[in-house]
Amino acid sequence: MNKKTETLSRRYEAYIGRKAVFLVIAFLLLLAALFAGVCIGASGMNVSQVVFSLFHDTGREHDIVWMLRLPRVVMAALVGFGMGLSGTVFQAILRNPLASPFTLGVGSAAGFGAVCAIVFYDNGLQPHYVAAGAFVFALISAAFIITIAKIKHASSETMILTGIAQMFMFSSLTSLFQYMGTMQQVYNIVFWFFGSLSKAGWPEIGLASAMILLPFPVLLWRSWDLNLLSIGDESAQTLGVNVERLRMWGVAAASLATAGGICFTGVIGFVGLVAPHMTRMVIGNDHRFLLPASGIVGALLVVVADMLGRTLWAPQVIPVGIVTSFIGVPFFFYLLMKRSREYW
Amino acid sequence: MMPQKRLMLIGIGWLAAFAFFTAEAKAVTKSSMTVMDSLGTLVEISLPVKKVVALNSDCLEALRILKADNLVVGVYSDIIRMPSFWKNLTHLPKVGRWNELDVEHIVNLEPNLVIAYGYNPSRFLEDRLKSFGISLLRLDFYKIDTLEREVTVLGQLLDRTNEAARFCDWHTKKREAIQGKRQKAPIRPRVYLEGYTDYQTVGNDTGSHEMCVLAGGKNIAADSSIPYPHVTPEWVVSENPDVIVKAVSSVNGYDLDNAGFFNRLREGVRERNTWRHIAAVASGRVHVMDGAISTGPRAIIGVAYMCRWLHPDLFKQIDPETMHKEYLEQFQDIPYQGHFVSDDLHEGKK
């Protein structure tokens, strides 16, 4: 019996060890991608110049590294992390593999908020109106879902249906405003929906990191509950999980993480769907590891996509939302084909 | 005397017959006219043109240049955004916007001619209007190179050849004066042209690029393979342009009391992260221009401003404000007012 327990314990340690190793490797890869992202740019600085400029005030080079490149890659990592994290949470609480920050209409609501700001307030003088509009509407949409869920006792079906209805409503409103807008406003709207990191600065990063990183420890603390939710509402309830409250907290935290990212960069939506799946295929469904790992994979995806977007067709920039899909989808298919069993 | 009289009568008869047949021939040739549109397509237009529908502001401005605004029976719906500029034309029936036209409304107005841009709206409109006997003519009026030809074509169609010639004469003189002086420019400053969206520049084959070249500048994004590429802020810093010119479309310059709006935008450009390292920012050569004078029939005024910004000493004699005043008062019949650029024309280098 002791031997059996010992074997089980060893197998569990190995099981945990594999996940921890993945987490460490993914984190190191992210650090490498961040470093590469800082080293690549139009100014043609070599690596040693970049490293030197990081720690010494070399004037122009120092400013380029600290005020253009670093904010860009840090914002890319933050947004990717937020999307990966919130995608995992939405998939867990709704117990639906197709769930993402956009399934519940949070992304569409953010888009509508941005469109309102572009059509009514954006004359080039108040760039933060667009971010504020996106953020406010993302939270309004989350609050609406939480209210409906509370009234209807938070079943996943109710939340998904409410989310889809919201998504269509905000998409229609966005189309209406696009229709009303001038050619230039429509161009700005389309470009916002492509996603861009060119306006990332330290003040924006400060706000985004607060909104993206603050929900993370709360979600991690509830990771066991998310694990239990995967075996069904009733079973989780029997094991002491307050499913209704978990869903509502989950929606609130994940919506905040989504809104915090996309309000400054525009829609980089695909990451929220694919990063959790990619990670789950490799390390399974244990949310203690899945949550941080999905965030890191999401961050890696967006940082690499931005690097490619900046370099493939330089000096033109391919919007990060487009590149994310270009590199994410083939990789996702590859993992999907390689898996011999159902992973969800 | 008799034979002489007879000969005279025969001669008069011949002359009368000749005059009659020539007039007939003239009437025959004038029942329609074949012209080339902005896409290089030959289009046959029935004459005389009595009613016109204008689908954009550039062709409407061209119609006013030709004093043919009395022929306009329908206009694009966005005209209401600039009531003081368009005056009575804003009260005409609206036939839709750039992205959605009300074809039935156009048909109900029974125009002979509808004028649209070369590429917008798409070709479906020709087919729809053709079945009602309405001609569609695609003329851009937003490129300096082709503007004079397009105004002349429209002048011929509307029997306003004198008005067309008068405008073309004015435009040619301004253009040639600029071109003549430009030859003497010792250097061509490198220019970053920013479109209406931040970090969106312009490649060649665009109106803004053409303006920059005409004003004696060198567009730093001229090699771009797409017309309106987005670039990184770092690329602009690394290119280190001598002059930055940003165009804006979100304001109606004709109604502005001062240049505060443009100045605030200029400050925003100057204060972008690390842009203080750009030569243009360091030397105060950042300028903002209303889209109304950076494209369309008034683009020559935008070129004049650009000349002053790019070569302040060489183009000291050129006064874009006077040029604009002449244009508005002589060719648009409206008084000169408003502000169209950041308020730094007379300051030179800051």
Image (tube, coloured by chain):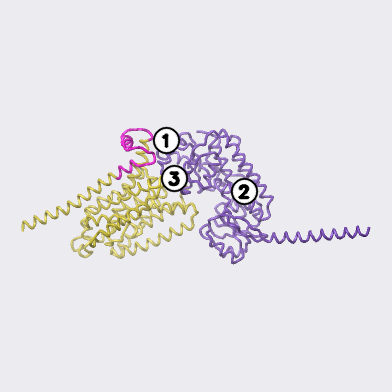
Chain colours: A yellow, B purple
Q: Is residue A333 above or below residue B330?
A: below
Asked whether the residues under marks 3 and 1 belong to the same chain, the reply is yes
Residue B311 visible here: yes
Q: CA distance from mark 3 to mark 1?
A: 16 Å
Where does the magenta region start and end?
A33-60
**Kind of element beneath mark 3:** loop
Subunit of label 2: B
Q: Is residue A190 left or right of residue A343?
A: right
Q: Which residue is at the front of the view, A39 or B69?
A: A39
User: If you read the primary sequence from the N terminus, does the residue marked by circle 2 or circle 3 appear first?
Assistant: 2
Q: Amino acid at mark 3?
A: Tyr
User: Percent from the top left, x then y, of residue A31?
Assistant: 27, 44
**Kind of element beneath mark 2:** helix
In the rendered structure, find residue B148 and report the number of the disc placed on it.
2
* Residue B346 placement: quadrant: top right
Q: Is residue B128 left or right of residue A136?
A: right
Give the residue pinned by disc 3.
B199
Q: Is residue A279 above or below residue B324?
A: below
Give the residue pinned by disc 1.
B277
Is-magenta flag for residue A41? Answer: yes
Is-magenta flag for residue B100? Answer: no
